Amino acid sequence: MSIAQKLQGKFSQDPSSKHPEQALKDFIAEDPNSVYTFDSERDSPKSELCREGKEKGRKCIEMQMYSTQLFQAMQNQGFFCALPMDPTRTHFECKRIPKN
Protein backbone atom coordinates (compact mmCIF):
# COMPACT_ATOMS: atom_id res chain seq x y z
CA MET A 1 0.00 0.00 0.00
CA SER A 2 1.42 3.37 -1.00
CA ILE A 3 1.73 6.34 1.34
CA ALA A 4 -0.95 8.16 -0.68
CA GLN A 5 -3.37 5.25 -0.20
CA LYS A 6 -2.64 5.16 3.53
CA LEU A 7 -3.21 8.89 3.83
CA GLN A 8 -6.41 8.72 1.79
CA GLY A 9 -7.70 5.91 4.03
CA LYS A 10 -6.82 7.91 7.13
CA PHE A 11 -8.63 11.02 5.94
CA SER A 12 -11.70 9.16 4.69
CA GLN A 13 -12.20 7.79 8.21
CA ASP A 14 -11.89 11.24 9.78
CA PRO A 15 -15.41 12.16 11.06
CA SER A 16 -14.91 15.85 10.28
CA SER A 17 -14.47 14.99 6.59
CA LYS A 18 -17.84 13.22 6.33
CA HIS A 19 -20.64 14.70 4.29
CA PRO A 20 -22.81 16.71 6.75
CA GLU A 21 -25.92 14.55 6.21
CA GLN A 22 -23.92 11.36 6.89
CA ALA A 23 -22.34 12.87 10.00
CA LEU A 24 -25.86 13.75 11.20
CA LYS A 25 -27.14 10.21 10.57
CA ASP A 26 -24.17 8.70 12.41
CA PHE A 27 -24.62 11.03 15.38
CA ILE A 28 -28.35 10.26 15.64
CA ALA A 29 -27.74 6.51 15.26
CA GLU A 30 -25.74 6.53 18.52
CA ASP A 31 -28.91 7.37 20.49
CA PRO A 32 -31.91 7.80 18.16
CA ASN A 33 -34.59 8.31 20.82
CA SER A 34 -32.93 11.20 22.64
CA VAL A 35 -34.01 14.81 22.42
CA TYR A 36 -31.75 16.89 20.16
CA THR A 37 -31.24 20.65 20.19
CA PHE A 38 -29.48 22.90 17.73
CA ASP A 39 -28.55 26.55 17.51
CA SER A 40 -26.39 28.85 15.41
CA GLU A 41 -25.58 32.48 14.87
CA ARG A 42 -27.74 34.29 12.32
CA ASP A 43 -26.70 33.37 8.74
CA SER A 44 -23.85 31.18 10.00
CA PRO A 45 -22.85 28.17 7.85
CA LYS A 46 -22.23 26.20 11.08
CA SER A 47 -24.66 24.96 13.71
CA GLU A 48 -24.15 23.26 17.05
CA LEU A 49 -26.18 20.07 17.45
CA CYS A 50 -26.52 18.59 20.95
CA ARG A 51 -27.99 15.33 22.15
CA GLU A 52 -29.68 15.42 25.54
CA GLY A 53 -29.16 11.72 26.23
CA LYS A 54 -30.60 9.95 29.25
CA GLU A 55 -27.98 7.23 29.65
CA LYS A 56 -25.17 8.78 27.64
CA GLY A 57 -25.55 12.36 28.89
CA ARG A 58 -25.17 15.53 26.84
CA LYS A 59 -22.96 15.45 23.74
CA CYS A 60 -22.55 18.21 21.15
CA ILE A 61 -21.01 18.36 17.69
CA GLU A 62 -20.52 21.17 15.21
CA MET A 63 -22.33 20.65 11.92
CA GLN A 64 -21.26 22.34 8.68
CA MET A 65 -24.85 23.27 7.88
CA TYR A 66 -26.99 26.39 8.07
CA SER A 67 -29.75 26.07 10.69
CA THR A 68 -32.37 25.90 7.93
CA GLN A 69 -30.54 22.96 6.35
CA LEU A 70 -30.20 21.23 9.73
CA PHE A 71 -33.90 21.79 10.44
CA GLN A 72 -34.80 20.08 7.14
CA ALA A 73 -32.27 17.27 7.68
CA MET A 74 -33.69 16.55 11.16
CA GLN A 75 -37.20 16.37 9.69
CA ASN A 76 -35.89 13.96 7.04
CA GLN A 77 -34.57 11.78 9.88
CA GLY A 78 -38.07 11.57 11.42
CA PHE A 79 -37.86 14.37 14.01
CA PHE A 80 -40.30 17.14 14.88
CA CYS A 81 -38.42 20.37 15.62
CA ALA A 82 -39.82 23.48 17.28
CA LEU A 83 -38.78 26.43 19.40
CA PRO A 84 -39.02 25.79 23.16
CA MET A 85 -41.91 27.21 25.19
CA ASP A 86 -39.56 29.66 26.95
CA PRO A 87 -39.45 32.82 24.76
CA THR A 88 -35.95 33.70 26.00
CA ARG A 89 -34.52 30.53 24.41
CA THR A 90 -33.57 30.64 20.73
CA HIS A 91 -32.50 27.05 20.02
CA PHE A 92 -34.64 24.38 18.36
CA GLU A 93 -35.67 21.20 20.18
CA CYS A 94 -36.16 18.06 18.10
CA LYS A 95 -38.00 14.93 19.20
CA ARG A 96 -38.39 11.73 17.20
CA ILE A 97 -41.87 11.24 15.78
CA PRO A 98 -43.16 7.82 16.93
CA LYS A 99 -43.79 5.33 14.13
CA ASN A 100 -47.05 3.38 14.17
Image: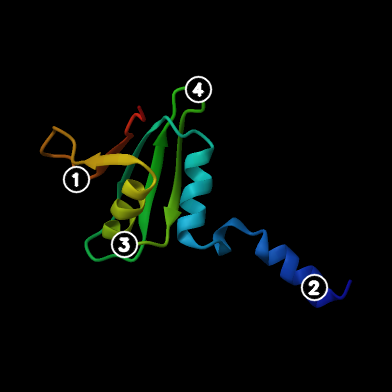
Question: What x and y, as percent, mark residue 25?
Answer: 49, 48
Of the numbered discs 4 and 3, the one sitting upstream in the chain is 4
User: Which residue is the site of mark 2?
Assistant: 5
Of the numbered discs 3 and 2, the one sitting upstream in the chain is 2
Q: Are marks 3 and 1 in contact (CB under 8 Å)?
A: no
Q: Considering the numbered disc 2 on the image, is that residue within a helix, a strand or a loop?
A: helix
Q: Residue at x 80, y 73 (%)?
A: 5
Res 3 → quadrant = bottom right
User: Which residue is the site of mark 4?
Assistant: 55
Of the numbered discs 1 and 2, the one sitting upstream in the chain is 2
83 or 95: nearer the viewer: 95
Q: Residue at x 31, y 59 (%)?
A: 69
Question: What x and y, as percent, mark residue 9?
Answer: 74, 65
Residue 44 sits above or below residue 3 on the image: above
Which of the numbered marks, if any, corresponds to residue 90?
Answer: 1
Q: Amino acid at mark 4?
A: Glu
Q: CA distance from mark 3 to mark 1?
A: 15 Å
